[in-house]
Image: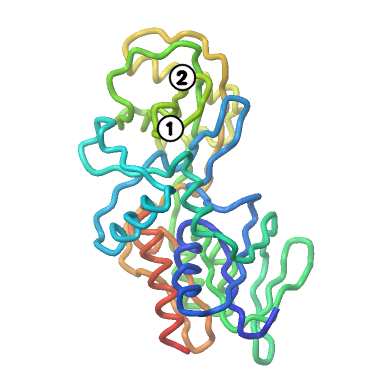
Amino acid sequence: MTPETIAIIGAGMAGLSAADVLRQAGQAVQLFDKSRGSGGRMSSKRSEIGALDLGAPAFAAQDPAFCAALRDWVAAGWCADWTAAGNARSCWLGTPRMSAISRGLLGDLPAAFSCRISEVFRGERHWQLLDAERNVHGPFSHVIVAVPAPQAGALLTAAPVLASRAASISMEPVWAVALGFTEALPCALHSARFDGEILQQATHDSAKPGRDNRLDTWVLQASNRWTRQYLDLSKEQVIDRLQLAFAETLEQPLPQPEFALAHRWLYANPTHRHDWGALADSRQGLFACGDWCLDGTVEGAWRSGQQAAQLLLASL
């Protein structure tokens, strides 16, 4: 590792967006992520019935720069328009699975996965990172923290103002359930949001472009409020509750699924919108970004990563 390398903690959309800007500017970067792969909530889970998008089911695009990036991703084969699925506005997703976008952005960038960074500290001239196994990584010239706000606060202690801002953010949890049926469900829409107490969204995952699921697969997301109330419910109970709520929403009984899986996202989205863009202590070379710096969307995460990288480059 050279002292000029920039560390990015978090390989979700915000961290990868920042890495993309820095790479194009000729900067060396090193990514770290506690998960086994890139993407964060845009990752896909492999299962016995095919890949499942348990996080962001799809996303919208309005910002001109983000729309331009989408055109590049479509040309590269990472992304597809899913507006025809009955959505009221432009809707996009990764293809053949959501994680195709993060994998495309990652490319051959150096990344350490299954590596949970627990501390960011500065030596006499450079930054060092300590992981959960007590291994030290570095030296680094700058650090970008691109993880959920509750985790970012603990990594930003060298910049108290940044740490305080991150610690002030509340993020909502979400339970997600995937159900696989041998026969297609009689549902006219492929994606729908609800105002129910339990069910927030249902997405026809196997109907997305390029999917190869061997069953008719739906991904259900619980409401934030219900998830908070039943955060520690067993996965089996969560599956039963969301399956029943889906049947009640469709106003018809559901066949017994051949496949069922539940996943809990502790930090799915911020409770409030902010207009920070990104956080920066340019004098020390410490920055933070994420969807929580803006509006909690995929586009917000991408924009925040872009801004963090640009602030870093402006400080050089």
Which numbered tag is attached to residue 222?
1
Q: Residue 177: x, y in percent?
A: 50, 29
Q: Is residue 228 visible?
A: no
Q: Residue 96: x, y in percent?
A: 47, 39
Q: Residue 15: x, y in percent?
A: 50, 63
Q: Identify the amino acid type marked 1.
A: Ala
**x 29%, y 42%: residue:** 91
Q: Identify the amino acid type marked 2.
A: Asp
Residue hosting label 2 = 216
Q: Residue 231: x, y in percent?
A: 54, 36
Looking at the image, is 194 positioned above or below residue 276? above
**x 47%, y 82%: residue:** 281
Q: CA distance from mark 2 to mark 1?
A: 20 Å
Label 1: few (<14), some or many (≥20) within 10 Å? many
Q: Is residue 5 visible?
A: yes
The quadrant holding residue 29 is bottom right
